[in-house]
Amino acid sequence: MSSIGGVPFYILEFGDELVYFTPYTITLFLLALVFTVLVILSRPERQVDIAFGGDAYTTKQISVDEMRFRRFMSIACGLASMGAMVTGDIFNFTLFTAMVGITNVGIVAAVKSPHVQNAAYQYGLVALSATVPLFGAAAVYAASTGSLSMIELARGTLPAVPIIAKALLVIGVIGEGMAPFYAAKAEMFRAPGAPYVIMCSLSSLVIFLRVVEVVMLG
Amino acid sequence: MWGEYSIGLLLVLVSGVIGFVALAIETDDLHRLLLLDLVEISSLGIIALLGTDLAEALVLPGLTVGIAELLALSQIYITKERLKDKPVKGLNIEVIRKADAPVVISAFLVVYGLILSGFTGGGVAGLGLVFFFMSRGYQEDLNMLEMASGISWAIWIFAFFVFMFLPQYWFVALMCAAVGIVLKVTVKMSLVGTMWGEHRE
């Protein structure tokens, strides 16, 4: 099998479901893994507001409950990203991407601040609507090639995947896994608590890098 | 040439488009949530069109994910509607208002940033805007900025799309990406520049 990701080191098969590691995906997997470990170990930063024209500043308090919830969501987000990196099945990939979308909303929505909540809500609407092209793409993949396995698609013996399916997949991933397709992502990022919010960005990065590989298959 | 699958797919896609149009027109948050549920059905329709056992196996996780997201969003909606009247003290900011100097300096920075272009240019131009907002207070309507941020992001995404699917037009895509990122960074910096506390809505 020759693909953008290189020759797989290892293929783990559970019947139809399969997991494989290529040099490309294992790099992304390790990145997500390391970051998840960092999220587990680190303590949240406290956002500082500085008053302009004076030397006054305030730090925001983060309650333990909120911290726990956001840490949980960040870990879930890391696990979903790792799953999306190693899965060898198009539909599982879309499911993991959808999970990344939910957990990204969750990381931000735990903050008890109206404008952050509002931003998270609007982003959630986008994420929810992005499941339509995402799952639609997986279904068109299955309908046109008869297989959802990335290994089979990469082998090149199946019918070519229609460009519309690939386009839908990319649109779905952009809407779902990539938080920024929403006008005011900066608004979301006013949420205090550094390591957790960065998980949103990291998952977007690895998901996007993986979808490039997936689109290249078949 | 038009098999049953194609006709079915066309119908589902048309209904999906109708749903999305309704979503774009609707402004009430709760109504949008309900419409989204409707739009979601069309994705299940596309999966169901496979018409095999596999479709059945795929509809279930699709439905589960959709419901999970719907639940999460309605929870956020509840929280966000209840938190409306939480008094938070603003910060005192002492700057010269209505003076000319900040306008001149920020205009210079913005123009220089636009000439630099790219990520650095966005940073410089954003700094100019940050300075402007600092000196003017923060009563400006941020909706325009947020819209510009969204549009620039869309340009950026479009450029990536061209890179991936029409690589022969890479130059156009490169230009689009450059313009998109300069706008994006500028707007993001200026949004950050206006964050002083929780009191703005």
Image (cartoon, coloured by chain):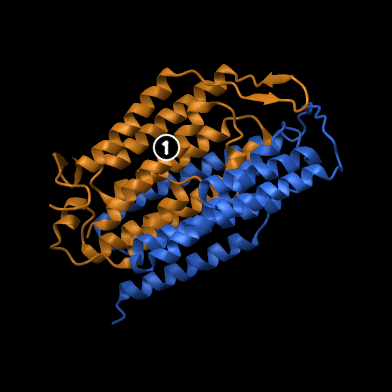
Chain colours: A orange, B blue
Residue occupying image coordinates x 20% and y 40%: A23
Which residue corresponds to mark 1?
Answer: A202
Percent across and percent down for residue A139 are 32, 59
Q: Is residue B61 left or right of residue B104?
A: left
The residue carrying pointer 1 sits among few (fewer than 14), some (14 to 19) or many (20 or more) residues within 10 Å by Cα, namely some
Percent across and percent down for residue B89 are 79, 26
Residue occupying image coordinates x 63% and y 37%: A116
> In terms of depth relative to the viewer, which is nearer, B26 or A214?
A214
* Count of labels in the image: 1
> In terms of depth relative to the viewer, which is nearer, B198 or B113?
B113
Residue occupying image coordinates x 50% and y 54%: A129
- Which quadrant holds the N terminus of chain B? bottom left
Q: Is residue A2 left or right of residue B146?
A: left
The chain containing the residue under callout 1 comes to A
- Which quadrant holds the C terminus of chain B? top right
Percent across and percent down for residue B186 are 61, 47
Q: Is residue A44 above or below residue B144?
A: above
Visible residue check, residue A121: no
| Residue at the bottom extreme of this rendering | B1
Visible residue check, residue B18: yes
Mark 1 falls on what kind of element? helix
Q: Identify the image quadrant of residue A54.
A: top right
Query: Tag 1: residue type?
Result: Leu
